[in-house]
Image (cartoon, grey):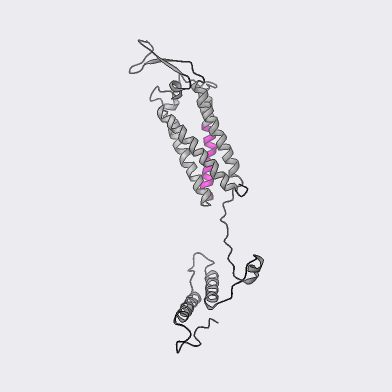
Amino acid sequence: MGKCSGRCTLVAFCCLQLVAALERQIFDFLGYQWAPILANFLHIMAVILGIFGTVQYRSRYLILYAAWLVLWVGWNAFIICFYLEVGQLSQDRDFIMTFNTSLHRSWWMENGPGCLVTPVLNSRLALEDHHVISVTGCLLDYPYIEALSSALQIFLALTSSVALTPTDTRRPRRHRIYNCSLCTRLGSSCPAPTPVSSALWRLTAAAASSGQDDRRAPWRLTGLLQLARLIWVCIRIGLGPSQPGLQGWGRVG
């Protein structure tokens, strides 16, 4: 646990956000809440991009994810104000969650904990193709359930933004051992140099010196000559030292 870095923590919070968003998406589908459904879909895509950017060291994706977190916190704050009817917002008058296309309410209105639904027959308030119901006995009313769900989303977004701040998007460098001094410092024995290892080291050095500019071809004439000499050394080792006419050709210089 002590080796878990900021990237590991951010991925963990992103996974929690995915679980919470999927759970919320299911209940919004059951309640035909089209505006939250669209917002949840965008949130799921942004979280997936955040996970990909964290794992693959892509800073642009993390910037996009951070910008979306700001919008996500604002949207959930609006949902809390809407269901608690803060200011001039009213659930009986405004049908923002369904884009004013239907009179559906939250799924928790009829399926909350302890709720008893009683249909009101022959009600004058019933519109065409609709019916009036009476909901009683709820342990927790649906506006508070929706407000608590949005508060959970805000909490996860804020904790993810805190974990996002110290995240390092630079790729770790791979240290390769080229000399015996580094072997000694790492506490390992330095292998004896061979013609093949010596040629490999020179070939790598030539490729590194010629490939500093990504716009230029990394293999130049020197690298090709070193590659040809390396192939010849491998052939010489495969044939054995007893073959006639091969003495003096395997020296890499």
Q: How many marks?
A: 0
Quarter of the figure with residue 63: top right
Q: Position of residue 122 (x, y in %)?
A: 35, 10
Q: Is residue 94 visible?
A: no
Identified at 56% across, 44% down, the residue is 10
* Residue 177 vs residue 32, the one in the foreground: 177
Q: Is residue 209 above or below residue 60?
A: below
Taking depth in this image into account, of 133 and 128 the one nearest to the observer is 133
Q: Position of residue 202 (x, y in %)?
A: 55, 74
The magenta span reads 59-75
Residue 156 lies, with reference to residue 141, above or below; the image says below
User: Residue lying furthest left in this view?
Assistant: 129
* Residue 65 in magenta stretch: yes
Taking the magenta stretch, the answer to whether it contains residue 38 is no
Q: Is residue 23 visible?
A: yes
Kindly indicate the quadrant of the structure image that contains residue 188.
bottom right
In the drawing, does residue 200 fall left or right of residue 98? right
Q: Residue at x 45, y 79 (%)?
A: 238
From the viewer's perspective, is residue 44 above or below residue 146? Answer: below
Q: Is residue 9 above or below residue 29?
A: below
> Which is more toward the observer, 106 or 138?
138
At x 54%, y 27%, the residue is: 148
Q: Main secondary structure of the magenta part?
A: helix
Looking at the image, residue 123 sits to the left or right of residue 50; the answer is: left
- Expressed as whole percent of the image width and height from the top left, the position of residue 141 reads 50, 20
Residue at the (43%, 34%) spot, across then down: 38
Q: Nearer the viewer, residue 136 or 187?
A: 187
- Quadrant the C terminus occupies: bottom right
Toward the bottom, the furthest residue is 245
